[in-house]
Amino acid sequence: MQAHKNMKAYCVKDLLKGDLLLQEISIKGWVRTFRSNRFVALNDGSTIHNIQCVVDFENTSEETLKRITTGAALHIKGTLVESSGKGQKVEIQVAELDILGDAHPDEYPIQPKKHSLEFLREKAHLRTRTNTFGAVMRVRSALSFAVHQYFHSNGFNYVNTPIITGSDAEGAGEMFRVTTLDAQKPPLDESGSINYKEDFFGKETNLTVSGQLEAEAYAMSLGKVYTFGPTFRAENSNTSRHLAEFWMIEPEVAFMDLDGNMDLAEDFIKYVVGYVLEHCTDDLEFLEKRLLDEEKSKPQAERSEMTLTEKLRFVVDNNFMRVSYTEAIDILKNSKPNKKKKFQYPIDEWGADLQSEHERYLVEKHFKCPVILFDYPAKIKAFYMRLNDDGKTVRAMDILFPGIGEIVGGSQREERYDVLLEKVRTMGIDEKELWWYLDLRKYGTAVHSGFGLGFERLVLFATGMTNIRDVIPFPRTPQNAEF
Ligand code: 4AD
Ligand code: MG
């Protein structure tokens, strides 16, 4: 067979549109299945769908046919024709087939059968070769594009805040230390403590838990900004909602109060979820079926009443319920599970921190829609939140989602120098570390607000997956940093 020279390289997604019929094309991808020594289902990651390639087995050597196995990389040249078979409109009549890379069936772990998500987690470098992970990661990519699109079309500037930091933004002390000191023999000062003056930065530094504090500096000059970057938390929570390394989106806006912040968060979430509904139809269709299958193994009472698309549509079409912390506590106090002592952490008084069981009760059982809780007790929230006139609550807001719990945490920031300084002192935070943050309140201070949205929790919601380890390419969790 003659080499087809000026043949154009396409991706599967383009070919399946069907408008290139009878053209000679070239395509590269990986074998998903090979049937009857004739039909290759080829996938190249551009879509969840495969293209069928029909091999002329009489003119293909036995040796080559044997090497067409699941996972092998192929280069195929041929003609796009109408398919007479069921399940596809077009197929490729193969003229030339090159094996670019073998995947020996005795060794290659991703075979065309159902693998458990747990098994695939251990093969994270190969798991995107499955339909489920291909779909999840394409949706993740689309969501990330939608995030930038939303902010750019609304006049926000994208800011890259530092990953190595000297301050603990959340004051929770759950940070990973960054150091070049010798762990065996660190230099000590006179009192016998580690002498960080000799460390790389001349002080103690950590991986950031949030870009908020630096974003505030930029909001107080560029007006509307957002960050979208990796954040790190050394909290030892081995749950399906926590990662040690996750991506956070943090808008910060000058002259905006808490009501504006809630409006922004709601509008933003509706936009990005709507974007996925509009642009990821094939992947959503697959993920919806996957979820239905998964739900079949659950007891009837725990099954969701809505399909994945219905859940996403619901978020786009309905207002989020806005409820104060005080109202929420009343609801929880009088709730059935609280009275029947079904909560692991019973709610008996105002001031209690809400656990995920409470958040999920409010969202899934009581309101049955996304909920924005606001005006939390100052005691359970970070130092930078604006104190209300009652002296005991702060202008905080958390957005709670069905199946997820907290997806957003945000607040109006304390813009009054004296009040902020007082708070820093009573919370025992080193004010010297925050000199520049306090400066923002000395020079041209103004009302401002922002929030942080955990990107992986958003991807969880949009894909209907249930474990956060399955929506980030290479998850970092306690005892796990493989790959
Ligand atoms: O509520 P958090 O801790 O808020 C902040 O960090 C603020 N500085 C944000 C701001 O106002 N700019 O975290 C924000 C969100 C949470 O609502 C949750 O979605 C996500 O980040 N998140 C995590 N996601 C995955 N794994 C973890 N360990 C997470 N911790 C928080
Ligand atoms: Mg929070």
Image (tube, rainbow, N blue to C red):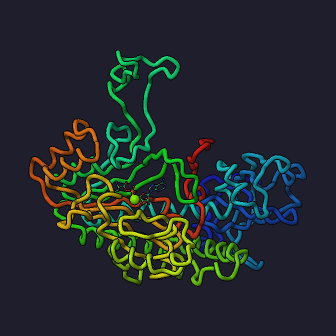
Looking at the rendering, which quadrant does residue 469 occupy?
bottom right
From where the camera sits, is residue 223 visible?
yes
| Relative to 175, residue 199 above or below | above
| Relative to 281, residue 36 above or below | above
x%, y% of residue 270? 39, 74
Q: Residue at x 71, y 51 (%)?
A: 73
Q: Residue at x 80, y 66 (%)?
A: 39
Q: Which quadrant of the render holds ligand 2? A: bottom left
From the viewer's perspective, tell me whether residue 174 is left or right of residue 472: left
Q: Residue at x 69, y 49 (%)?
A: 122
x%, y% of residue 365? 51, 80
x%, y% of residue 199? 38, 23
From where the camera sits, is residue 267 visible?
no
- Is the N terminus in the top left, top right, bottom left or bottom right quadrant? bottom right
Looking at the image, which is closer to me, 351 or 453? Answer: 351
x%, y% of residue 15? 61, 68
Looking at the image, which is closer to me, 416 or 147? Answer: 416
